[in-house]
Image (cartoon, grey):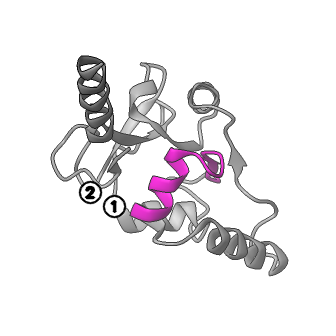
Amino acid sequence: MRLALAVALVLGAGRECLALELAVIVNPQKGISDVSAAELREMILMERQHWRGGGRIYLILPQSGSPEKDVLLKKVLKMTEEQLRRHYLGKLYGGEIAAFPSVARSGTGALRTVSLAPNAIAVVDAGELDPSVKVLRVQGRRPGDAGYLLASPR
């Protein structure tokens, strides 16, 4: 009994230490490799809707309530889900955007869409990455680097 309790405590503690790291991904053909935190925030808030080289940004966000969305809200946007929803509603009713951003049902779905859509950008769990997309550096850092902005304890 004591051994089972000790194992459960050790395994539980280990899970709490695991970090969730997000990756900002684009189509491999996109001529961008780095984005600042401010640029990423502008894109997610749809304040910036076009790529530097032209073309409308096709934004794909994680589902509401997901760990990925929570990290994005806390680390990049510094707002709640409700504040973000109100922000998008204001832009929608103000005629600044035609629709809310797309929402990926899964990381795999976001990867597939980004790999096929030249102007897409998405934020996914870095553990789900595959070679079909390009990972952008954020503030000069990639997932796994010390001080990476989009890392958070689970």
Counting from the top left corner in percent of width and height, residue 94 is at: 80, 81
Asked whether disc 1 touches disc 2, contact meaning CB atoms under 8 Å apart, the reply is: yes
- Between 110 and 15, the residue placed more toward the observer is 15
Inspect the image, locate mark 2, and give the three-letter code of the amino acid beneath it. Gln
Residue at the image point whose x is 56% and y is 28% from the top: 111
- Between 152 and 124, the residue placed more toward the observer is 152
- The residue carrying pointer 1 sits among few (fewer than 14), some (14 to 19) or many (20 or more) residues within 10 Å by Cα, namely some
Q: Quadrant of the N terminus?
A: top left
Counting from the top left corner in percent of width and height, residue 29 is at: 48, 31
Magenta-drawn segment:
56-75
Vertical side of 63 occupied by 125: above or below: above
Per the image, is 62 magenta?
yes
- Between 2 and 138, the residue placed more toward the observer is 2
The circle on residue 36 is: 1
- The residue carrying pointer 2 sits among few (fewer than 14), some (14 to 19) or many (20 or more) residues within 10 Å by Cα, namely some
Q: What residue is shown with label 2? A: 139
- SS assignment at label 2: loop
Q: Is residue 96 left or right of residue 64?
A: right
